[in-house]
């Protein structure tokens, strides 16, 4: 029998997560959100994309936790994202209430699930989920190290002008100021990173990884500090947004307006039902 994954929160992170789950045919997916109509619309779009992708999974959107019953995994993305200038910790009180209520409801219907927390501030929200679910601690995990490591590798590949596939790196610690990109374990095709990038540039890359640096392009589009993840929202422009550094735009002589228009046009084409 196919596995069932519930994704709580049908926003940028949740919808992206649901889409990847479906695309990779990993599980049937239930997308649940408090906003009426939104998870249903996004779920329908994804279900309709399955024949195109040649995958066979069920994707449904809902406002009811009853539909999430007997999930194997619950992914908690519901919660406010940061706005420019905010730290992840600034979200603490707002997201505490959201995570507590979502997890309590989901855990009731899926008492044997594993919970993957994504909402920020991640380290604190994991503890909220642990307590709200009453699950054993080995069934409540947080997602961040993978993303932090991926960001670090992306920035290093950009700086060295090499493929990300050639960059080996590892990021440990919390998802915030206590994040530790391990320079001693970072290399490009086996060459220590400290031999390839000057110390001050390396420090800037480490800071950018910790802060999830917001480029002017992202900010100008109203995209929040966490929005490297938006890069994953619509498959068609993953590369485009992920590459959305000022340098990238400059080298293509694109104006900010032209860049924003490009993004919106592609999003409209891909998410026509929702938008
Ligand atoms: N761990 C990580 O590495 C990581 C990475 C990116 C984002 N985040 C965090 O993930 C969270 C979501 O980010 P986003 O960009 O998807 O935000 P978003 O605003 O796009 O989506 C949030 C969604 O949560 C929904 N929601 C709010 N309250 C709810 C409730 N009580 N019940 C159900 N749904 C509810 C909203 O309707 C919205 O659709 C943020 O807290 C963000 O900081 C974490």
Image (spheres, grey):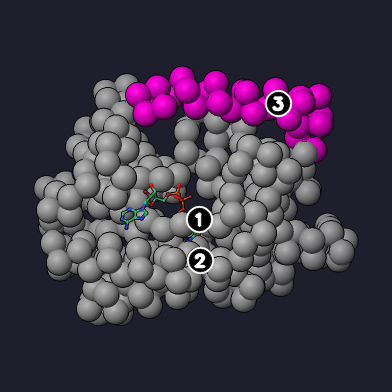
- Secondary element at tag 1: loop
Circle nearer the N terminus (3, 2): 2
**Ligand 1 quadrant in view:** bottom left
On whether ligand 1 comes within 8 Å of the CB at mark 2, the answer is yes
Write down the residue under mark 2: 91
Circle nearer the N terminus (1, 3): 1
On whether ligand 1 comes within 8 Å of the CB at mark 1, the answer is yes
Within 10 Å of disc 1 (Cα), the crowding (few <14, some 14-19, many 20+) is many
Q: Residue at the location (38% across, 42% down)?
A: 15
Q: What secondary structure characterizes most of the magenta part?
A: helix
Expressed as whole percent of the image width and height from the top left, the position of residue 239 reads: 59, 34
Res 95 seen here: yes
- Image quarter in which the C terminus is found: top left
Contact, mark 2 vs mark 1 (Cβ under 8 Å): yes
Residue 195, picture quadrant: bottom right
Write down the residue under mark 3: 257
Point out the stretch of residues depicted in magenta.
247-275
Q: Residue at the location (44% across, 66% down)?
A: 94
Task: Please say whether residue 163 is one of the residues in the magenta stretch.
Answer: no
Task: Please say whether residue 254 is one of the residues in the magenta stretch.
Answer: yes
């Amino acid at each position: 029998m196919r596995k069932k994954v519930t994704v709580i929160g049908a926003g940028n992170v949740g919808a992206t997560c649901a889409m990847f789950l479906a695309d990779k045919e990993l599980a049937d997916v239930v997308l649940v959100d408090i906003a009426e109509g939104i998870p249903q619309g996004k779920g329908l779009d994804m279900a309709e994309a399955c024949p195109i992708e040649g995958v066979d999974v069920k994707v449904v959107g809902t406002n009811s936790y009853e539909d999430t019953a007997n999930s194997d995994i619950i992914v908690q993305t519901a919660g406010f994202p940061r706005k420019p200038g905010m730290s992840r910790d600034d979200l603490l009180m707002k997201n505490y209430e959201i995570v507590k209520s979502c997890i309590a409801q989901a855990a009731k219907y899926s008492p044997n699930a594993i919970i993957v927390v994504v909402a920020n501030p991640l380290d604190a929200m994991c503890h909220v989920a642990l307590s709200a679910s009453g699950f054993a601690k080995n069934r409540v995990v947080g997602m961040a190290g993978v993303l932090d490591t991926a960001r670090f590798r992306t920035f290093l590949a950009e700086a060295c002008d090499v493929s990300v596939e050639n960059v080996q790196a590892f990021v440990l610690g919390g998802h915030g100021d206590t994040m530790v990109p391990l320079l001693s374990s970072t290399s490009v095709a086996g060459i220590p990173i400290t031999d390839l990038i000057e110390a001050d540039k390396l420090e800037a890359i480490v800071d950018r990884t910790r802060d999830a640096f917001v480029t002017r392009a992202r900010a100008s589009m109203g995209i929040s500090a966490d929005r490297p993840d938006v890069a994953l929202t619509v498959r068609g422009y993953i590369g485009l947004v992920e590459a959305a550094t000022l340098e990238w735009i400059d080298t293509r002589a694109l104006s900010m307006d032209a860049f924003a228009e490009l993004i919106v046009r592609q999003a409209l084409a891909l998410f026509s039902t929702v938008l």
